[in-house]
Amino acid sequence: MSATDLTSDHFQRLQSGAVVAQTARPSLSYWADAWRRLRGNPRAMVSMSLIVFLLAFVSIGPSLWRVDPAAQDLDQIGIGPGADRRVTLAEPFQQWQPSIQDIALADNPLGFTLAMPANTQAVRLIWSEQLAQQQQQPRYRLYRNLFAPSDTGSFGLPLAVVDRSWFEDRLDLQPGTYYYTLVALDADGAATANAVTQTVDVIRVISIAEARQRGLLDAEETAELGQSLELAWHPLGTDYLGRDMLARLMYGGQVSLFIGIFAPLAFVLLGVIYGSVSGFLGGVTDQAMMRFADFVVALPFLLFMILFKVIFGIGPGESGIWPMLVAMIILLWPAPARLVRGQILQIREEGYVSASRLLGGTTSYVVGRHMLPNTLGVILVTMTFQVPSAIFTEAFLSFIGMGVAPPTPSWGAMCNEGIKSMLTRPHELLFPAMLISVTVLAFNLLGDGLRDALDARMRGSE
């Protein structure tokens, strides 16, 4: 059938709006479409939720959990989450005057036994005088261990060498099980075959006066010896100085995230300005500016970090937050500058840029109105990837003692403190390391999502 054979009978009138319903879809702007694509990425949305939670954790958290991160709870040092917080009321500490006749000795070669129930005030041990009567100058060496000597092959910490038949241990006692080993020495000071190990369970106690002073008992509240009370609650435990881990993680996160967000904002902004000017001008100016950027890349970061600490007058053991920020801003801008320069070199050849120039647009207008807005997606992605890099840099510098120094908390500094006791108190290292890992992972996944959402070439795959 040819076109001349077509009549009005071959056509059908469509209802009003039918074409629009079949062929049209709502018009979306670039940013609305990018947000739609980002919402369709589950990993990016979960990462964004984690970042919002972390920001709320370090900003709103301290107002909800009002615990001083520097306050020490000396009754709960190095405890883990969910530790026993019970404390028993006892008599105030009094000097011990042992009386061997009133104590039943144990059935072992030295009669080594516990003189009275052990608590955090003192562990009082006593043994037989029989060996002392056989030697002119009897001596004993007493050891203390957190683990059974049969399992470790070691008696543990040597407490003292004594020439009497009793000993009172008051050295940093914490609730738990201790293993005391008594070794008899010969006249030359060498250990004999007489060695006895005693297992001692230490309970936490406090006097009634101390309980009232710390607010565990009201002034009018009656109390009896042997009564059990609950000490202050530490949801994530305490560190080796008895400081609340949750409070220190909150305040430490403020330092880590401040450095991790403020430093990238500053050096990415500097790189954007430098790269856009270099790319727009081009020619010899562009080459000279890029060679200077290459020179900055070659500068050693740690060396300049030390130099800035000297310039700022920060001595050993002092926090170097501002030298760290200055070093990052001065030395890390070339990477975003190169990226923005490449985008500007590509965009300046577009037709709408040439038209803007022909219409009399100034350099600042063309760059600010046309070029930079079209590179904003790349800038946001770069910023997102630079944040975890800055957080990790702060954690690394604080870990090696060149960044944030105690008592100022930061996640990196807390890892540095926690690694010293990771075998006995792993929570001191686990929690800050976990927050660093989660933050870095969340920003990286969000950066991947933003890159896919803002890349116009990805739209064709839908």
Image (cartoon, helix red, strand yellow):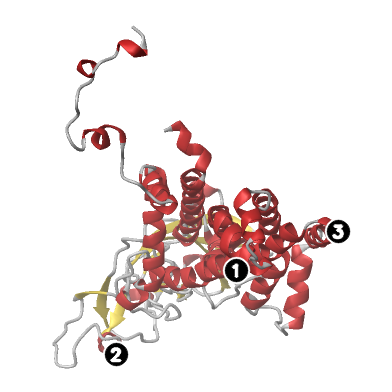
Tell me which label, 1 or 3, sits earlier in the chain. Answer: 1
Are discs 1 and 2 less than 8 Å apart at CB? no
Q: Quadrant location of residue 120?
A: bottom left
Q: Residue 170: percent from the left, percent from the top? A: 45, 76
User: What kind of element bears circle 3?
Assistant: helix
Q: Residue furthest top?
A: 1
Q: CA distance from mark 1 to mark 3?
A: 31 Å
Q: Which mark is residue 213?
A: 2
Q: Quadrant of the C terminus?
A: top left
Mark 1 or 3, closer to the camera? 3
- From where the camera sits, is residue 212 visible? yes
Mark 3 or 2, closer to the camera? 3
Instruction: Classify 22 as above or below 63.
Output: above
User: What kind of element bears circle 2?
Assistant: helix
Q: Compare residues 69 and 176 and report the one nearer the observer.
A: 69
Q: CA distance from mark 3 to mark 2?
A: 75 Å
Q: Quadrant of the N terminus?
A: top left
Q: Residue furthest front?
A: 4
Circle 3 sits on which residue? 284
Residue 170 lies left or right of residue 327; in this view the side is left
Q: Residue furthest bottom?
A: 219
Q: CA distance from mark 1 to mark 2?
A: 45 Å
Residue depicted at x 64% and y 80%: 318
Circle 1 sits on which residue? 263
